[in-house]
């Protein structure tokens, strides 16, 4: 028995790997509609959309450039701020040192005056004590002389009367 080959019908032809294309008027109409839509939509849709995209790109780039410029200005302002802060700190340190030096001089002057005052009070006190001691010794000498005369008078008998 021999097997006869089956006739290739379009479904069988597609399964066997071959494809048949059927070109008719609808393909031409579709191509005309596509080209017509391209010419109609290009000024109505594509150009405005592309313009919007370009405008958005320009604005984005402009904003980026402006942000870079602002960032540079902020950096310059920050550096100026740091320099001014350093200058103020330096001036404050100089003023603090000057005030400390003046305070030290004033303190030394006050201490010198206080020491001089204390030395004068101590010296005056010593002089007063010396004067008082001299007066007391003198009074004690007179009193002892008077007592010794009284004792002599009593011993001798003159004051017993």
Image (tube, rainbow, N blue to C red):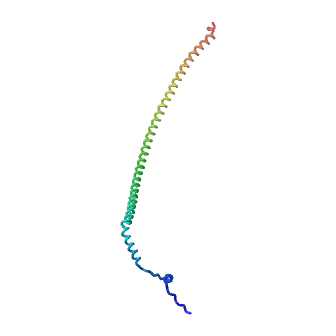
Q: Where is residue 129 in the image (x, y as percent from the top left)?
A: 53, 23
State the residue lying farthest toward the top: 161
Residue under the image location 50 percent in, 87 percent down: 7
Quadrant of image for the N terminus:
bottom right
**Residue 20 location, x and y as percent?**
45, 82
In the rendered view, would you say 29 is above or below 113?
below
Relative depth, front residue between 87 and 143: 87
Q: Residue at x 40, y 78 (%)?
A: 25
The quarter in which the C terminus is drawn is top right
Residue 3 position in % (x across, y down): 54, 90
Residue 63 image offset from top left, x and y in percent? 40, 57
User: Residue 159 is drawn in which quadrant?
Assistant: top right
Which of 144/110 is in front? 110
Residue shown at the point (63%, 10%) measured from the top left: 154
Q: In this view, does 136 lie above or below 49?
A: above
Does 102 appear above or below 142? below
How many numbered circles does the render carry? 0
For this orientation, the residue located farthest to the bottom is 1
Residue 112 vertical placement versus 87 (above, below): above
Question: Which is nearer the eye, 3 or 82?
Answer: 3
* Nearest to the observer: residue 78 or residue 22: 22
């Amino acid at each position: 028995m021999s097997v006869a080959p089956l006739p290739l019908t379009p479904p069988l032809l597609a399964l066997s790997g071959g494809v048949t294309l059927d070109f008719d008027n609808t393909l031409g109409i579709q191509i005309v509609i596509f080209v017509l839509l391209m010419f109609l939509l290009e000024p109505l849709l594509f150009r405005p959309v592309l313009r919007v995209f370009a405008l958005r790109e320009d604005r984005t780039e402009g904003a980026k450039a402006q942000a870079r410029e602002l960032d540079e200005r902020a950096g310059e302002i920050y550096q100026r701020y740091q320099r001014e802060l350093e200058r103020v700190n330096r001036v404050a340190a100089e003023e603090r040192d000057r005030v400390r030096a003046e305070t030290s001089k004033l303190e030394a002057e006050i201490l010198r005056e206080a020491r001089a005052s204390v030395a004068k009070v101590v010296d005056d006190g010593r002089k007063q004590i010396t004067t008082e001691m001299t007066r007391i010794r003198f009074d004690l000498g007179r009193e002892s002389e008077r007592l010794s005369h009284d004792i002599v008078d009593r011993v001798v008998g003159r004051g017993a009367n």
